[in-house]
Image (spheres, rainbow, N blue to C red):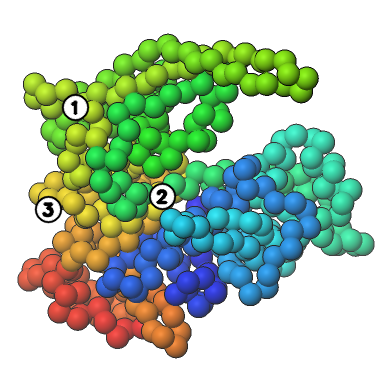
Amino acid sequence: MLSRFLIENYRSCLRTSIDLDPNLSVLIGPNGSGKTNILKAIMYLNKMAQEENYPPFHTQVSTAGPRIKATFEQANGAVRLSALVGAYTDEFNNDVLRGSVQNWQIGDKKRKRTLRGVPLAFARRVSQQRFRVHYFQRSYIMHPSGPNAVPRATQEHDWRVLAEVAKYCLGITYYGASQFTNPGSCPVSFEIEEENQRQAVLRLRGHAKFLHSMYSASKAEANASYAQFIDIVGPRGLRLIDSLKFREFQVSSVDRSVRVGGKMEVRTRHKRLVIPQFRIGKQKLSPNQLSEGTFKTLALLFHVVTGDSTALLIEEPEVCVHHGLLSSILEVIKSASRRKQIILSTHSDYVLDQVKPENVYVVSSDRAVGTQVYKISKTMTSREFGGLREYLATEGNLGEYWREGGLEDRS
């Protein structure tokens, strides 16, 4: 579980820190305050844990780039990561990781152990003995020597701890309302190569990737979370759709290429064509025929309910969603936060009305200091916070309190 996160030199976050709730954290603030920047900075943890972004041992990273400090709470104590990140922004305003330098601290202040240069992606593979031996030989683990030397068993324990952190970071997922704008651009089908399914999936982007995720979840045996998702969005729940089916057809294509010497090479590729079909009433619709509100709500609820994510970052769940439906969605989100850590950003006072004040963080931005975050329960005395709770129980709601400026200038 991520308990504390600090980011420096990243967009509007000159030096932004936040102490996160173990279950649900709600970031509230006006447009441009930096809420999305905080979520995208946290996603760096996921990018560092992915095998595809595994950097070389001696990555050259500019010291002017973003810096991350993250604290993870585990059963045996805190684990702290300090990372210097090298990245660039692509044409879609997405962060692309080029490399990073990652250092770790494990243990308490009396017996703190330091691990230098251990990438998260590498920590995922520590169960393989040959990788551990290689890193021990490279002396990347800076354990104390002499009379305070750490036993080998403790070193093995440290590897297991890092593996758990890497598993958490790999399980961080992101939902942004802007990801699912204009369902009319959504493909009506997608193909999966039988010989190389993993590469075929990696080539999917945007709407097609989401459709494939739903398809994969529907094919998994005894997938209780997918069945729950269908119950929530189906006729017994929110009535967004009546049913969802994936029709499959086996197809093939022939590739021809000329090798050196003029020899013709012919290769047959076997593929699976998958056609999603949504039924609403008597209509059978392709994904691109759904309304934007329906598509976004399906995507949001799928991210919340299904999958084995360890943490979910949600950007503006209120976009294109009717208030009556939003209330039900927020109840699903709060229920899911008991199983996975959820960090949610919003600028809707209606969303605030549905959550507890101890879960709320106010985000503001100043040209001199950049994005700043404070948890409202930490900036009030116990008497003030008790008065707020009494006000919410008897007179008003949190959204109105925020709209009237009750949460401003408390940092």
Residue 24 seen by the camera: no
Q: How far, Cα to Cα, is label 1 from label 2?
A: 27 Å
Horizontal side of 171 relative to 400 (left or right) equals right
Residue 406 image point, x, y percent: 20, 80
Q: Residue at x 63, y 48 (%)?
A: 53
Q: Estimate the x, y position of residue 82 in percent, counting from the top left.
A: 64, 65
The kind of residue on which mark 2 rests is Tyr
Instruction: Measuring from the top left, give residue 272's x and y in whole percent.
Output: 44, 17
Depth check: give the residue in front, 95 or 260.
260
Q: How many labels does the image show?
A: 3
Q: x and y percent of residue 357 in the render?
A: 26, 66
Instruction: Tell me which label, 3 or 2, sits earlier in the chain.
Output: 2
Q: Residue 174 carries which label?
A: 2
Q: Which numbered mark, 3 or 1, is in the foreground of this view? A: 1
Q: Mark 3 points at which residue?
A: 323
Which residue is rendered at x = 78% and y = 49% of the image? Answer: 155
